[in-house]
Amino acid sequence: MIVGLSGDEAVAYGVKQADVDIVAAYPITPQTIIVEKFSEFYDNGEVDTEFVPVESEHSALSACVGASAAGARAFTATASQGLALMHEIVYIASGLRLPIVMAVVNRALSAPINIHGDHSDMMAERDSGWIQIFVEDAQEAYDATLQSFRIAEDLNVQLPVMYGLDGFTISHTLQRVEMFEDLKALDFVGRRELAKVRIFDKLVDYALDPENPLSLGPLSLPDYYFEHKRQQEEAIYRSSETIKKINEEFGEISGRYYGNGLIELYRIEDADLSIICMGSTAGTTKEVIDRLRADGKKVGLIKVRTFRPFPKDDILKGIRGLKGVAVLDRSGSYGGIGGPLFGDVRNAINDLKGEKPLILNYIYGLGGRDITMEMIKGIYDDLESEEKHDLVSYVGLRS
C-alpha cells in the first residue's frame, strides 16, 4: 500500500500497526503530529490501546516505565526539551531493562529557543543505555517504528530504543511511504514475549505480578552496581547482531534493506573520499554523489544508522582504502574536540592497520539551518584539496 505521509504520520501508523498496549505522551513541536494522529486512531476505535495524555514528558516516560514493567508494549514520542525533561527516567528505563520504544523528532535544545532540527537532543542521551537509530526519510521512519519493537523486545536485548527523525525536514515533509497491510505488519512485529528470571526455586516472567512478587530497581550499592551496569553494556553490544538479523528479515518481506542495519554504504567500493553522516543529510549526500560520479569523482557515503551501539567494525571496513573522510555532525560537543560522531569515528580509526585516511569534522545545520548540495560538494572539494585543513570546520556559518 503506497500513501503520501509526513514522517510524523508514518510513525503514528507504524505504532498503530504494532498493536501497542499503551501510548503515553505530551505534545511538543515538531513531535505533536505523532500523538495527534494516534489520538485519532484511539478516538475512532481503531486501536485497542490505553492512551494516556499526561501533564509532562517526565510523566510520559514514567507511565511507560510502569506499564512496561507490568508486561505491556509501551511507546512514547518527544523532542528537544521534552527529552531533556525525561532525562532522569531515560536512565531508569534502560537500567530496568525495559523494552520501551520512543520516537524522537530531533530538535535543537534551548537556549535560545529554537523549534527546528538538529541532533543535540539525542546526543545528550547517547550514554544513557538506549539503542539509538537515526532515520533518513519518512519511509525509514515507518520501517524503524516496526523494527524498533522487535529489537527492544528481543530476549537477547531487552533494552529501550529511541529513533530520531530530523525535525520538520522529515517530520513535516510529505513523502511516498510504502506501508504493510495491518496483519502483515503485526505478523512481523509479533507479540511481546517476557524474559524469565529465577526467583528462589522457580522461573517467572520478568514483570510485576502479585502472584510472583519482584523488586525492580532496588538499592544497588558498590558490591553489585558495577556488575549491573556491565550487563547492560553487554546487552547493547549484543543488540548489534539482533539489529542486523531484523534488518535482513525486514528486507526479505519488504524489499527495503538499510545496509546491514547498522550502517549503509553508498558507492563506497571504489571511492577515494567519503562523507560519514546520520539522518536526512544522507539522502542529500547521495544525490550529490551521483552528480559528482557523473563528473568522474570517486566519492561515496557511509551512513551511520545506529549511533548506539556504535558500529565500529563496520565503519572501519567501509573506511579501509579511503584517502579522506569527512564526518558531519549536526550537534556540537562544546569544550570537546569536534562533534560526537567525529569523536567516535576518529577513535575507531586509530585501530586501522597501515596508512590511515585524512579525517576531518564538519559541524553543520545547528538549529535547523539548511545544508545544501553545494555545501556538501564543497566538503568533498575540501577533502580533495592539498591545502592545510582545519580539523574542525563549520559549514554554512556566517562569519
Image (cartoon, rainbow, N blue to C red):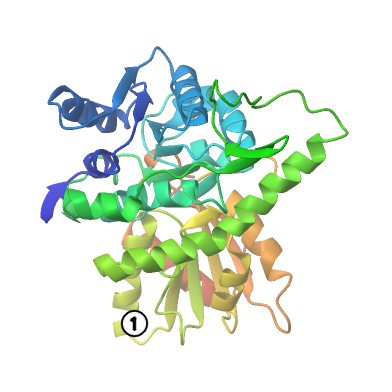
Expressed as whole percent of the image width and height from the top left, the position of residue 355 reads 70, 83
Please report the residue visible at 20 percent of the width from the left and 51 percent of the height from the top.
183
For residue 177, which quarter of the picture?
bottom left
Instruction: Give the camera-side residue of 141 and 356.
Output: 141
Q: Find residue 155 and report its horizontal and vertical position in percent.
A: 54, 51
Residue at 61% in and 33% down: 96
Tell which residue pokes out farthest to the top in this image: 55
- Per the image, label 1 sits on a secondary structure element best described as helix
For label 1, the residue is: 293
Where does residue 317 sit, x and y in percent of width and height?
Answer: 58, 77
Q: Position of residue 102 (x, y in %)?
A: 42, 37
Callout 1 amino acid: Arg
Q: Which quarter of the rendered picture does the N terminus lie within? A: bottom left
- Say few, some or many: other residues with alpha carbon within 10 Å of mark 1 (under 14 / 14 to 19 / 20 or more): some
Q: How many marks?
A: 1
335 is higher (above) or lower (below) than 67? below
Whether residue 43 sits left or right of residue 229 in the image: it is: left
Can residue 258 be seen at all in this image of the molecule? no
* Front in this rendered view, residue 257 or 348: 257
Q: Is residue 349 visible?
A: yes
Residue at the farthest front position: 201
